[in-house]
Image (cartoon, helix red, strand yellow):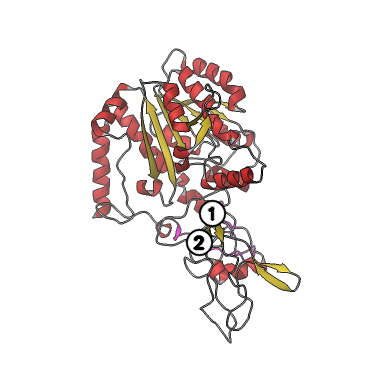
Amino acid sequence: MKAISLFCSGGIGDLALQNSGFDVIVANEKINDRAQVFKFNYPETSIIIGDIWQKKETILKEIIRKLSGEKLDLVFATPPCQGMSKNGRGKLLNGIREGKKSEIDERNLLIIPTVEIFVASGADTLIMENVPEMEKTYIPHPYKHGELINILDFIQESLGKNFVRCIRNIEFADYGVPQCRQRLISIFTKNEKLKSYLQFSGDLFPPPTYSKDGLNLPLWITVRDAISHLPPLCADNPKNAKCQSIPYHYVPLLDEDKYLWVSNTPPEKSAFDNQCINPHCRFTGNQTHQAKKNSHGINRASTETPIYCQKCGHLLPRPWVREGKEYRLMKGYTSAYKRMSWDAPSSTLTRNLSYACSDNKIHPSQHRVLSLYEAMILHTIDKYPFQWKRADGKKISDKLIRDLIGESVPPLGLEQIFSFIMSILTDNHQNVTKSQQKSQQLCLF
């Protein structure tokens, strides 16, 4: 079956499409660096590089050319989430209060050309991925001046009564991904098989294959399950920070201060909660770091967390800023400089996954952040023949790898959703469900 991919980035999400039996004939990505990675991994796909607003007609013409009279089945779209995410919305609210930003984030308007391309393409099904906050996002109605409309309602209104929708907030750890990552998956379709199945079952999503509590399903796959077998690393010097035998299994060095903070951080704790290291004191009752919402509803970290031991006055190994001869606590949330748990999926991998100050990104027991190789495993990219190369021959940077991982969805979980859709379209969903049940039973016993 034929599909196109909009906002494809480097093509990590498209691994799921491809492995589910969809032929991705055309893709669009605005940023050239990311498009070059996609182009290397999908040489048979026509990729249109540039702003979707400006490239809309080019995309549609290329779809017609590649189809050669055949039918387009599916459009997969992953528009930017920064304008919808909690972090993006918080920044937006601050900007509005300070008079620096308009109330509407322009990135949220990218849904308009997305829907226009989908309608013009003649495809039956639109599948979108975004942050859960998409459900509460509003945009100016493009055809009704001065009116705001919920972004999902705008899509439904634009598509018409022939389309039905099935929308769910998916936790990808429920599908065997060793990472907690929640995303809103929105399916809009006029395909009769999908509509009939939705009417019969009330859902277009596959049943979970794992669970947090382990009741009737295997437990979530943990960080220990995924990466504990790898050679240890340490961010104290260049020799210890790299494994020569495994590509991308290396970490950035930590400066002397950061290494002190991280090396004194207990399991599943933040460096902001570190206790006294004075050998004559070792007081463990110093106030820990807290955060609470202010009057505007924005979460703020406490400014009263001590940086000196409350018993002996010794400088605590907590993230600090030097001000002359004095120290003050660095501004940061309770999840900054925090160790992951061995016995749970990792936290959501972001573009800042290589920074110790990022949320829950310190290795569970070693004094360092995750390596890029570990991130690839936790994101399930290692399950696919994806290559970190560019079509233009340039070397791919570590930053670009982090961006591609942080902005994509774990393909192993997404593949189960696409495969379930494919099974309904090909009348094979009963076999898929039986296969999933058998797999679960094997895991349980």
Quarter of the view holding residue 393: top right
- Asked if residue 242 lies in the magenta stretch, the reply is yes
Residue 91, horizontal then vertical, whole percent: 60, 46
Residue in front for this viewpoint, 343 or 23: 343
* Residue 276: % across, % down: 57, 78
Judging by the rendered image, the residue that carries numbered circle 1 is 246
* Residue furthest to the right: 324
What stretch of residues is rendered in magenta? Answer: 227-251
Q: Which of the marked residues, 1 or 2, is nearer the chain's N terminus?
A: 2
Instruction: Indicate yes or no whether the magenta region holds residue 284.
Output: no
From this viewpoint, is residue 44 visible?
no
Residue 268 spot, x, y in % from top left: 47, 65
* Nearest to the observer: residue 300 or residue 278: 300
Mark 1 vs 2: CB contact within 8 A: yes
What's the distance in space between the residues labelled 1 and 2, CA to CA?
9 Å
Give the percent coordinates (x, y) of residue 285: 51, 78
Task: Note whether residue 80 is visible.
Answer: yes
